[in-house]
Image: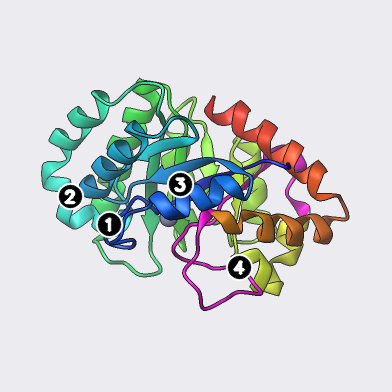
Amino acid sequence: MISFTDTHCHIHDLEFFPGGGDEPYEQGCAAGVRRQFLVGTDSRSSEEAVRFCADKDGGAYAVIGIHPHEAEKELPGSAEFLRWCRAQTGKKLVGIGEIGLDYHYDHSPREQQIALLEKQIELALELQLPVSFHVRAAFDDFWPLFDNFHGIRGVLHSFTDTVETMEKGLERGLFIGVNGIATFARDRDETTKNIPLDRILLETDAPFLTPAPIRGKINVPGNIPLIASYVAELRGITVEELSQGTERNVDRLFF
Ligand SMILES: [Zn+2]
């Protein structure tokens, strides 16, 4: 079977999957999504991600961090959160995320988003872990902040910006995360086509961003093959070639 990794999903998050993520996890494994990265968005869901992975044999990996939306709520307790993160290092923790800046929604004041992002980048560098970045309508502030640090490795998760912005990410060694948006936002085709094969990562961002042709349902990791076939066809390569390329990228960045 062709194998994939879902590098960004939230099926462990009880807010989104009140019945627990075990069923979508198993279903994803059966669909060839042999590795699934459970990504935190605040301190609660980061703890849930670690707990979810602990009792899975293999295949479930945790990415922990605080989303920019939560900066206002979580910044006061961030020292304690960072201490907790340091205690989670081990074979199931593969990254810090999702962290970044979101000026599209501005759910938290920008200076608090920036302060929290800097603390979490420092943590990633200290723990030598890659980062899953969420950056929306904020690249003008993001690049100078990024360039103040040295040695950051990571992915621009759910990338929907221009080819020009993508090139700025590639210059800095970043990977580009592609999800269901590629299947229904056709104005992104140019970007999706131009990502070098050695820099693409596949993700679902489940429960969000369900790919075509099953829009309207709750998204799950088992939908990675739908995204992969769309992307492969768009790029004129086989699904096998895309799988080989993206799996190699996962190994290079996270393992
Ligand atoms: Zn996400």
Closer to the observer: label 2 or label 4? Answer: 4
Q: Quadrant of the C terminus?
A: top right
Residue type, mark 3 in image:
Phe
Task: Kindly tell me whether mark 3's CB lies below 8 Å from ligand 1.
Answer: no
Q: Specify the amino acid type for callout 1.
A: Leu
Residue lying at 36% horizontally and 36% vertically, measured from the top left: 53
Q: Earlier in the sequence, mark 2 or mark 4?
A: 2
Mark 4 highlights which residue?
Answer: 211
Tell us which disc is closer to us: 3 or 1.
Answer: 1
C-alpha gap between disc 2 and disc 4: 31 Å
Lower position in the chain sequence, tag 2 or tag 3: 2
| Ligand 1 shown in quarter | bottom left
Write down the residue under mark 3.
133
Residue for point 24% across, 56% down: 70
Find disc 2 in the rendering and name its residue: 74
Inter-mark Cα distance, 3 to 1: 22 Å
The spot of residue 39 in percent (x, y) is 39, 46
Question: From the viewer's perspective, is the residue at label 1 or at label 2 nearer?
Answer: 1
Question: Depth check: 158 or 214 in front?
Answer: 214
- Looking at the rendered image, the disc whose residue lies closer to the viewer, 4 or 3, is 4
Secondary structure that dominates the magenta span: loop
Q: Position of residue 198 (x, y in %)?
A: 73, 37
Q: Say which label, 4 or 3, has the lower sequence index.
A: 3
Residue at image location 25% in from the left, 30% down from the top: 85
Q: CA distance from mark 1 to mark 2?
A: 19 Å
Q: Residue at x 80, y 43 (%)?
A: 240
Q: Secondary structure at mark 4?
A: loop
The magenta span reads 194-221
What label sits on residue 109 in the rendered view? none
Residue type beneath disc 2: Glu
Residue 165, placed above or below residue 5: below
